[in-house]
Image (tube, helix red, strand yellow):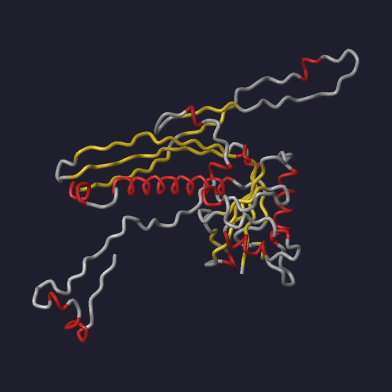
Amino acid sequence: MAHFEPSASNRQNFNSSTSNQTNSFWVPEIFSQKVQIAFRKAAVCEAITNTDYFGDIAGYGDTVNIIKEPQISVSDYTRETDTAAGRTALTDEELTLIIDQAKYFRFEVDDLETRFSHVNWQGIASDNAAYQLKDAYDSNVLAAMVAGATTNTYGSASAPIDTGFASGEIDPIDVLSRLARLLDQQNVPEENRYVVANPIFFEELAKTSSKLMSVDYNQGDGGLRNGLVASGMLRGFKLYKSNNLSTIAGTGSYSGTDLYGVLAGHMSAVASASALSQTESFRAHDAFADVVRGMLVWGRKVLRPEALALGTMLID
């Protein structure tokens, strides 16, 4: 919006041909047709979780039963051994993915805004609503993943790992090496591994003495949508940066300190499934306006806790 008002000393010479008219110094305000769009956080959960069950859900309250692979025992065999003693009874153990999370939005577009506005308010608001739902979904899934990463841990809320390069501090690259080793010990496949961390950790990682990251960063390309940091891998991990990975509250002598999680894993570790169950528009009963509302439902389940590893970091 632009507006110009001449100073008092210059008013008598400004537009002298209309000096006796009421609107002689009126300048129209100009409204831009471009709307300032708020910055968006990157969403990473769809890139790092198993979404194979997406097509099996329809709405809130749905349940997806996932059959676990049976574990077969093997026994020593010698001549004339009775094999019945070593038989394994097959079980149909199931994991249950429940669609039990939901968020909704609702807004109204007044008829005056629709008729006289210079921008499409419904389109702009709908775009922001979609982002807010996706951001809530991403935060929720990441929180569930951190809570489920209890099998392989490096550091804790009472004894975090101090990353850095001073005496007694751990090089951030060595943190990735430890998380990779923890997954190796659980026989987790090397392909489709990832690490998600706060931007603070990646700042430390970029300072590493080996300078591996100096050529690996995307320099802003590709990370806007899914947080991917580098086109290549480091210590066998795809690297994702996220502000939705919440801080960890320190305990004991670290009480009151915000610690940072570094979450590593394999894509098969967690299943997530979402569905935009409904979006609708109708006339408001108490205003001259159109109401637009929608709801997103989803579920998440840690299927393989042994395929997750969590480092708890104290980052200066």
- Residue farthest toward the right in the current orientation of the protein: 79
Is 203 placed left or right of 138 in the picture? right
Residue toward you, 256 or 206:
206
Residue toward you, 53 or 185:
53
* Quadrant showing the N terminus: bottom left
Residue toward you, 163 or 110:
110
- Residue farthest toward the bottom in the current orientation of the protein: 9
The residue lying at 27 percent from left, 60 percent from top is 31
Q: Position of residue 275 (x, y in %)?
A: 43, 35
* Quadrant showing the C terminus: bottom right
Vertical order, 231 against 303 (above or below)? below
- Quadrant position of residue 175: bottom right
- Residue farthest toward the front in the current orientation of the protein: 17
**Figure label count:** 0
Q: Position of residue 82 (x, y in %)?
A: 82, 14
Is 78 placed left or right of 30 in the picture? right
Q: Position of residue 36 (x, y in %)?
A: 37, 58
The residue lying at 26 percent from left, 63 percent from top is 30
Q: Position of residue 203 (x, y in %)?
A: 62, 64
